[in-house]
Amino acid sequence: MARLRIGSRGSQLALWQAHHVSALLRERGHEVELEIIKTTGDKITDVALAKVGTKGMFTKEIEEALAEELIDLAVHSLKDLPTELSSGFEIAAITTRENARDVFCSVKYNGINDLPQGARVGTSSLRRQAQLKAVRPDLDIHPLRGNVDTRLRKLEAGEYDAIILAAAGLNRLGKTQLVKQVIPAEIMCPAAGQGALGIEIRAGDSVTRQHLAFLDDPASRIATTCERALLNKLGGGCQVPIGAFAEVRNGQLHLEAIVADPDGSKVLRESRDGGDPVELGESVGETLLRRGGDAILEEVYGQGIAVPQQP
């Protein structure tokens, strides 16, 4: 069996993801080594992610290690991977998806509607901020960076009345004690690819691709391909106020998508069924642009927030 070197970020959640994939590979008889790689996103911890504005900020250094053959595969949160990979790489597998939705965490309150007027809510995501503001314009949204433990600690210390996190990360780490509400996608549309892991390899490395084939989940691949096609059409990175959530319903692929003004004053929602994931994602993206999404995104990019650059 093969000796496989996995590259991963060093955060608690990234390591959980890498160890999860390692365990599945070891079950198949492979020898696995783990290389921890510090990325740009890990080094910049005092600035809201949306203001950093680099596509691939959690993947660039890992891809460099792949290109230099220091590692054989990289395990990413799929939502961190740019929609257009550099030509030297491919996604060999997209794993079975965890719950893709966002969750409301609080010590005192049971949901968004229970928060008092002017409550302080933590999130550094423009996508979450915009959708929160759309339903509760009175809320006081504050930036929140750090790993999952740091964020939960700040919540428990009373720095925030509530914080919004991804269900997937909390479920994987077994830290769901403060989850009070799983927010429906119709209220808070998740980020494209949220809850899925993308396993990246060097383009054309058919041997490694073969070793990883068993990890590829067809349903996750179809849904996230659709979401990423939409994101690509809109030219957005993972920090732009764009949401996309696809799932198979009654044998048809259903896509919910949003483009929103960061202050929540305008949220464009579009949902549609289709057969071909790329076609569905692109056509919904086209509709959102035509309905005014282009003006919203131009303004976001014009403010120097989340300018989409390839790594």
Image (tube, rainbow, N blue to C red):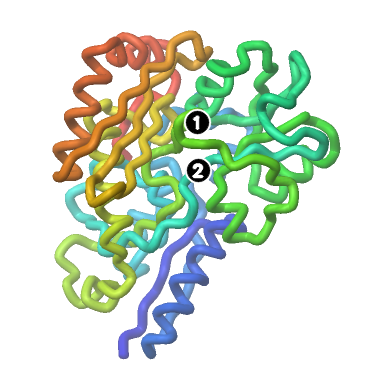
Q: Residue at x 25, y 17 (%)?
A: 289
Asked whether residue 84 appears in the rendered view, the answer is yes
Element assignment for label 1: loop
State whether residue 132 is above or below residue 37: above
Between 221 and 4, the one lying in front of the other is 221
Q: Residue at x 80, y 31 (%)?
A: 159
Between 107 and 239, the one lying in front of the other is 107
Q: Position of residue 266 (x, y in %)?
A: 44, 11
Q: Give, as a three-letter code, the residue at label 2.
A: Arg
Between 183 and 304, the one lying in front of the other is 183
Q: Give, as a three-letter code, the residue at label 1.
A: Met
The residue at which mark 1 appears reads as 188
Task: In the displayed orientation, state which residue is furthest to the front.
Answer: 250
Q: Residue at x 59, y 57 (%)?
A: 171
Q: Is residue 112 left or right of residue 9?
A: right
Q: Position of residue 255 (x, y in %)?
A: 30, 37
Q: Residue at x 29, y 33 (%)?
A: 231
Between 305 and 282, the one lying in front of the other is 282
Mark 2 touches mark 1? (CB < 8 Å): yes
